[in-house]
Image (cartoon, rainbow, N blue to C red):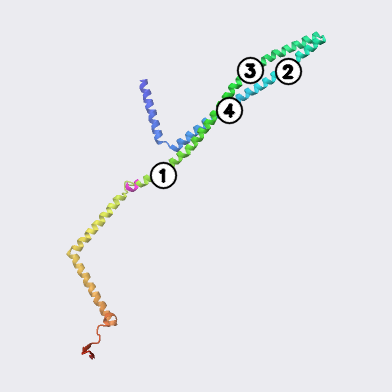
Amino acid sequence: MIQTLKKWWKYLTARADAEFEANADPKIQLEQAIRDSKEQHQRLKEQAANVIAHQKQTEMRLDKAMAEMEKLTGNARQAVMMADEAMQRGDEVKATEYTSAAEAFAQRLIAVEQEVEDLKALHLQATQSSDEAKAAVSQNSQKLQEKLAERQKLLSQLDQAKMKEQMNDAMTSLNEQVGGDTPSLDEVRSKIEGRLAKAQAASDLNASSTEGRMAEIENAARHTQAKARLEELKSQLGVGSAQTAAPEATTETGGTTATAEG
């Protein structure tokens, strides 16, 4: 039962993830990825800063211990010299005191020398860790810059994809119905062509029918009457063909011309 519930839960989770990925905005997902990369880089810088700070602290402790070692060495030498001088003067008390002081300086010097050696080893490790942290930050910074450049490229490609999708939708809508009550361009074209063909067919039938011939004859008769009426008007006005309707009659006889009077 428990195994079945686990499988069912995994199935629902995978289905939800698939639906989310299908409906998610790529631009928002891209910004989320860049934001995560920036946050990761910031955390890496903070960790690297802690490592470098530890290296700096170790270096400061080493410098302080080396200065202390140098000071103790000088004091021990001075105590030995003063004990020797007191011994030469025959002052055994002073010689013993200076010798005791020299031994005390020597004991402290031994402890500081050991501390210096330990700090040197620690400083070497801290320096190596610091160098590795700096390299890691530098490499991650380069990767982040590459991701930022890739983001610009992907955003440009996303804009191009959206533009092409809109163009494809616009082209598709020219051949598809916009809505349930809106005809497509092909349907309108087919309807217009059908009406044109029907009108042309009716015109052809009218032209070949008796009524069509009668109408043709009537048109010709009206045209003839109009021409006759026009000639009549021209004759009354003495223009056009009416002016040359009655030219003078002439006869030719043996090369001589005779005029015939009215």
Residue numbers of the magenta segment: 172-176
Q: Quadrant of the N terminus?
A: top left
- In percent of width and height, residue 26 lies at 43, 37
Crowd tier of the residue under label 4, counting other residues whose Cα lies within 10 Å: few below 14, some 14–19, many 20 or above:
some
The residue where tag 4 is placed is 49
Tag 4: amino acid: Ala
Dot 1: within a 10 Å radius of its alpha carbon, few (fewer than 14), some, or many (20 or more) residues?
few
User: Tag 2: Cα neighbours inside 10 Å, few (<14), some, or many (≥20)?
Assistant: few
Q: Quadrant of residue 9?
A: top left
Residue 74 numbered mark, or none:
2
In the displayed structure image, the side of residue 186 where residue 105 appears, left or right: right
- Residue nearer the viewer, 228 or 155: 155
**Dot 4 or dot 3, earlier in sequence:** 4
Mark before the other along the chain sequence, 1 or 3: 3
**How far apart, in angstroms, are the residues tagged by discs 4 and 2?**
37 Å
Label at residue 117: 3
Q: Give the CA distance from mark 3 to mark 2.
A: 19 Å
Q: Is residue 143 left or right of residue 217?
A: right
Please tell me whether mark 2 sits on a helix, a strand or a loop: helix
Q: Residue furthest left?
A: 210
Residue under the image location 29 percent in, 52 percent down: 189
User: Crowding near pointer 3: few (<14 within 10 Å), some, many (20+)?
Assistant: some
How many numbered marks have been drawn onto this rendered protein structure? 4
Q: Which residue is mark 1?
A: 163
